[in-house]
Image (cartoon, rainbow, N blue to C red):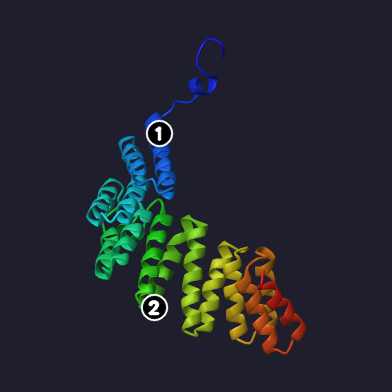
Amino acid sequence: GAAGGSPLSEAVPLSPLPAAGHLFQCRGALLHRAGRLEAARAAYRSAVRHGCGAPAFVGWALLEEEAGEHGEAAGLFSRGADLEPEHAPLHNAHAAFAERRGDTDGARSIFRAACRPGACGQARSFVGPDLSRCSALLHGWGQFEQRAGYERRAAVLFERAARLGRGCADDCARAWHALGSVRLRQRRWDDALEAFERGLAGSPRSSPLLLGAGLARASLQQHEPARELFRRAVAEEPRHGRAWRAWGVMEARLGEVEQARRGYSGGLC
């Protein structure tokens, strides 16, 4: 109104410090991408001072890693974990930092510490009000084990992540897709199909899940269902080159030359 503050500010109590913290965190990320490390460092410091927790510590730690200050980076990850022990993306980033330094045992220890009983409300026994956080943490751990060459461990973690991911459809879909992909590489076609179909139950329009289910059906010689799954995958994501190529490969093997040509052409997009 004309007499004073805006109606919105009068009606809604504002919390300026957290809002300011997130703004400083965004400023730090932009400055970091622009290569202005000292200015970005100052912005992250302000973000922490104004109440932005784990995201600011992650950004700041990654900046220090880029600057070669690995000890400082490790300390920032630890400070963030002390402040927000339930923040799965921070633990994933911390473990990835250790992995980049060649410390695979240290990376695994970070995941184990984050998931141990009592480490945080969401991770305790993998139950809690926000299960998607645990799903994201287990999925990150599974990806780490997969890169380290331990596919069986990865599969166990992906399955646990998928079953816990009911708090977030995206986390659940990613975990089922990761598990299905492991099963495909293991040539366990029925298990792969089950994983992809479980993911599709929650995310029926996911092009990667549709592709995975199509690959499993094709491997089981179920060509008509596979064809329909490939068609749906490219309908949902017309520039999904891998889905187009997989469809083309299947049609070529079946002697369907014209359909194979369309698939390969679509894969060039």
Measured from the top left, where is residue 46 in percent x and y?
A: 33, 37
Instruction: Please identify the quarter of the rendering in which residue 66 is found.
Output: bottom left
Left or right for 230, reference 75: right
Measured from the top left, where is residue 170 in percent x and y?
A: 51, 59
Any mark on residue 20, and which?
1
Left or right for 50, reference 253: left
Identify the element where label 1 is drawn. helix
How packed mark 2 is, by other alpha carbons closer than 10 Å (few <14, some 14-19, many 20 or more), is: many
Residue at image point 25% right, 48% down: 79
Left or right for 116, reference 198: left
Instruction: Please identify the quarter of the rendering in which residue 235 is found.
Output: bottom right
Q: Determine if residue 86 is in view.
A: no
1 or 66, which is in the foreground?
Answer: 66
Residue at image point 31% right, 66% down: 99
Measured from the top left, where is residue 267 in percent x and y?
A: 66, 73
> Circle 2 sits on which residue?
151
Q: Determine if residue 163 is in view.
A: yes
Q: Earlier in the sequence, mark 2 or mark 1?
A: 1
Identify the element where label 2 is drawn. helix
